[in-house]
């Protein structure tokens, strides 16, 4: 039986991204239509400047959360995690930038999924459960 107890911290095999480009570190929850991840911002992060986690890092965290959903779904079926890419981003708002050593939580809701194309609504939260960023994203599994 596959691991269905959360949180799952050993997620490297579930996403195609590798160090130093990993922007998720824990799978907090999973369902057919949603996923939740967390990520602690460390001092060696590529998107850290002046102790702030920059917008590209937040957007990459959003995309990797979606990749984590796909990767865990494939893992449950005993298949390797596929590679994908961001097809489009819309309505992204970043309300403030999290700081070094903060842990952010990202929740994605699958709006539509068809033939490897997934449209999601995503929200990123700080430790106080305040929304720090939100948006919609379309991801595509590479063929």
Image: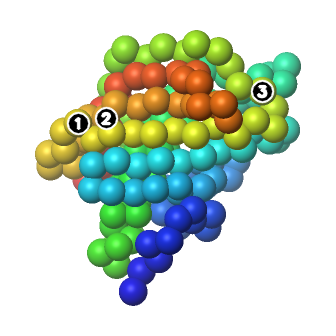
Q: How many marks?
A: 3
- Residues at discs 2 and 1 in contact (Cβ within 8 Å): yes
- Which residue carries the number 1 mark? 111
Q: Mark 1 falls on what kind of element? A: strand
Question: Coloured how?
Answer: rainbow
Horizontal side of residue 83 vs 16, given as left or right: left
Give the vertical position of 50 relative to 47 (above or below): above
Q: Residue at x 46, y 56 (%)?
A: 29
Numbered circle sitting on residue 22? none
User: Could one spot residue 13 in this view of the protein?
Assistant: yes
Give the vertical position of 115 relative to 92 (above or below): below
Q: Mark 2 falls on what kind of element? A: strand
- Which residue carries the number 2 mark? 120
Q: Position of residue 140 (x, y in %)?
A: 29, 42
Residue closer to the observer: 35 or 75: 35
Q: Position of residue 57 (x, y in %)?
A: 62, 30
Please tell me which of labels 3 and 1 falls first in the chain. Answer: 3
Q: Residue at x 53, y 57 (%)?
A: 27
> How many C-alpha atoms fall within 10 Å of the one at disc 1: few (<14), some, or many (≥20)?
some
Q: Mark 3 falls on what kind of element? A: loop
| Quadrant where the image shows the N terminus | bottom left
Q: Which quadrant would residue 78 be assigned to in this image?
A: bottom left
- Which residue carries the number 3 mark? 99
Q: CA distance from mark 3 to mark 1?
A: 30 Å
Q: Position of residue 84 (x, y in %)?
A: 37, 47
Residue closer to the observer: 42 or 2: 2
Horizontal side of residue 115 vs 84, given as left or right: left
């Amino acid at each position: 039986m596959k691991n269905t107890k959360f949180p799952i911290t050993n997620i490297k095999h579930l996403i195609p991204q590798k160090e130093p480009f990993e922007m998720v570190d824990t799978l907090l929850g999973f369902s057919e239509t949603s996923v939740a991840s967390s990520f602690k911002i460390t001092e060696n992060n590529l998107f850290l400047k002046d102790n702030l986690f920059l917008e590209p890092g937040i957007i990459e965290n959003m995309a990797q959360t979606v990749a984590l959903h796909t990767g865990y779904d494939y893992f449950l079926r005993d298949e390797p995690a596929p590679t994908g890419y961001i097809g489009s981003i819309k309505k992204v708002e970043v309300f403030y930038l999290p700081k070094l050593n903060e842990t952010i939580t990202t929740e994605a809701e699958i709006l539509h999924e068809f033939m490897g194309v997934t449209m999601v609504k995503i929200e990123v939260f700080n430790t106080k459960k305040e929304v720090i960023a939100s948006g919609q994203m379309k991801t595509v599994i590479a063929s």
